[in-house]
Image (cartoon, helix red, strand yellow):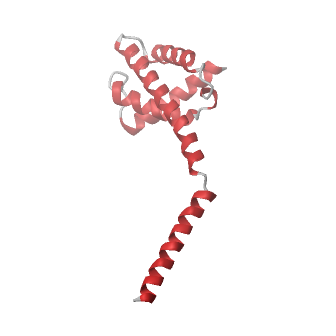
Amino acid sequence: MKTLFKKINLRLFAFIILIISTLFIFHTDELYASESVDSTLIKKASRSYTKKFCNSIGFGLSKESSMNFSLKENNQVFNKRKNFKNINKEALAEEIAIGVIEKCGYPIKLSGEKGIMEFKNYYLSKDKESTE
């Protein structure tokens, strides 16, 4: 009975040491903090862009006019934020494309994965044009 108790205590102690050493080796707080700031900003920018784009489409503007309007408006709002210049453009474009296709893909004749990829590429090209 004593040897069984010693084995259990030894394994529990080894497990605790393993968990503690993992926390010291990998700085999880820093990883989570940097991930959440970027992902939060991406979600806010995406929601804002999607709302502006879909409203523009609803008012009868063309896809290109809606894109230009939404890009200008979003850039004016979010350029004041310090991390927006360093944001992952691919992740932002993906999030925007998903939102636009879900909310107003039908009027612009886009749907599904193919529509998401097409809108993402279109957004990235227009974003690149607007920054030049």
Is 107 on the left or on the right of 83, as rendered? left
Residue positioned most to the front? 2
Examine the image and state in which quarter residue 127 appears: top right
Question: Residue shown at 43%/26% (left/top)?
Answer: 47
Tag count in the figure?
Answer: 0
Q: Residue 83: where, in percent of width, then height?
A: 61, 29
Q: Quadrant of the N terminus?
A: bottom left
Residue at the limit of the structure toward the left, as seen here = 106
In percent of width and height, residue 70 lies at 49, 17
Q: Looking at this view, is 91 or 27 the one in front?
A: 27
Q: Eyeballing the image, is 129 above or below 93?
A: above
Q: Nearer the viewer, residue 52 or 128?
A: 52
- In this picture, is 95 found above or below 58? below
**55 or 32, nearer to the observer:** 32
Q: Farthest residue in the right direction?
A: 132
Which image quadrant: the C terminus? Answer: top right
List x then y, in percent, for residue 101.
Answer: 38, 30
Residue 29 rendering spot, x and y as whole percentages:
56, 47
Between 69 and 122, which is closer to the camera in this rendering? 69
Residue at (36% x, 37% y) in the render? 112
